[in-house]
Amino acid sequence: MPMAFNADEAEAIGAGLLIGGPVGFLIGHQLTRARSYSPGQARAVTWGASWGTIQGALFATMFDVDAEVAARLMLAGGAAGLAAGSLIARREIPAGTGTSAMLGSLWGLWYGVASSVLVELEFQGTGAAMMLAGNAGLIVGAVAGSRVPLSRGRARLISLGGVLGGFAGAGMVLIGQPDSEKVAIGIPMVMSMAGLAVGALATRGGDWADRSDDVRSAASLSAPGSLLNWSEGDWALSTPLPIPAREATPVNGGRDGLIWKVPLLKVRF
């Protein structure tokens, strides 16, 4: 928030970190006291805020605005997403539907990036492709999760198949060293699609419900955010949540630009 008001001093950033966390916790606490939320409804609210923030960052990328304006767009997007998620959560949402919508949006971001490389879009065009593909993935994931009996565990396993397929494709690229950038991005793109398809077929007809489908059990789970999560001696697989940041990038000639950090490991002691 301090960046949104051009307050880049260490004191302002520190105050924002100290105040923002408790305020967010108190707001969430008051919301859950006012009414009970199922895991699917909670996912709609939290991911609505996160997805709105990502949309604001992508909008900033499309128009190549400075850091102050980008921060304001992200704040506005997060607030709008929180409001939209709260409205959607007024109806019952199965946990699997909420998870498949979230995963679909993240896969849409990846395919938006890959497609922008294949069609040789500029940096701003990449942001637009990510926005369109991400929202399309969100809709497809939500519709698929509501039409097909899908637990949260099965949705994660299908996504894991896509991740493994993408890593396999990346390994093929490293071994083959193709000269074409399009081939280098196309192979992981196709392999991740194949991995998603294999994951969907391999998990048909099974009972893949996990502890997080239960409200009481979900309360005992640590917050995800990375591909691998370790907490109190237990390992858990989750979807890595991209985190936008402003750093100097070669694409912008060394100037500050929007980048996405994807956490792969989270350890909680």
Image (spheres, grey):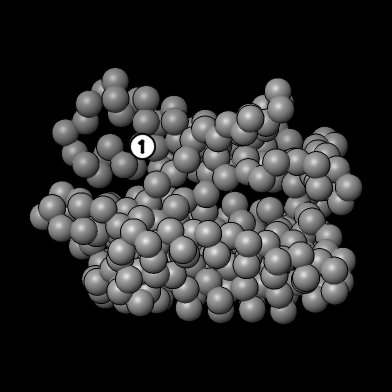
Q: Residue at x 47, y 73 (%)?
A: 75
Q: Please state if 25 lies on the left or on the right of 110 as rendered.
A: right
Mark 1 neighbour density, 10 Å: few (under 14) some (14–19) many (20 or more): many
Q: Please state if 52 lies on the left or on the right of 151 as rendered.
A: left
Q: Quadrant of residue 227?
A: top right
Image coordinates for residue 198, horizontal then vertical, percent: 61, 35
Image coordinates for residue 94, horizontal then vertical, percent: 81, 59
Q: Residue at x 40, y 56 (%)?
A: 244
Q: Please state if 64 lies on the left or on the right of 84 as rendered.
A: left
Residue farthest top in this picture: 175
Above or below, comparing residue 95 to residue 56 in the picture:
above
Which quadrant of the figure contains the N terminus?
bottom left
Q: Please state if 87 lies on the left or on the right of 66 as rendered.
A: right
Name the residue that disc number 1 marks.
187
Q: Quadrant of residue 168?
A: top left
Image coordinates for residue 79, horizontal then vertical, percent: 56, 76
Q: Residue at x 45, y 35 (%)?
A: 166
**Which is more toward the observer, 10 or 223?**
10
**Which is more toward the observer, 155 or 15?**
15
Which quadrant of the figure contains the C terminus?
top right
Q: Quadrant of residue 203?
A: top right
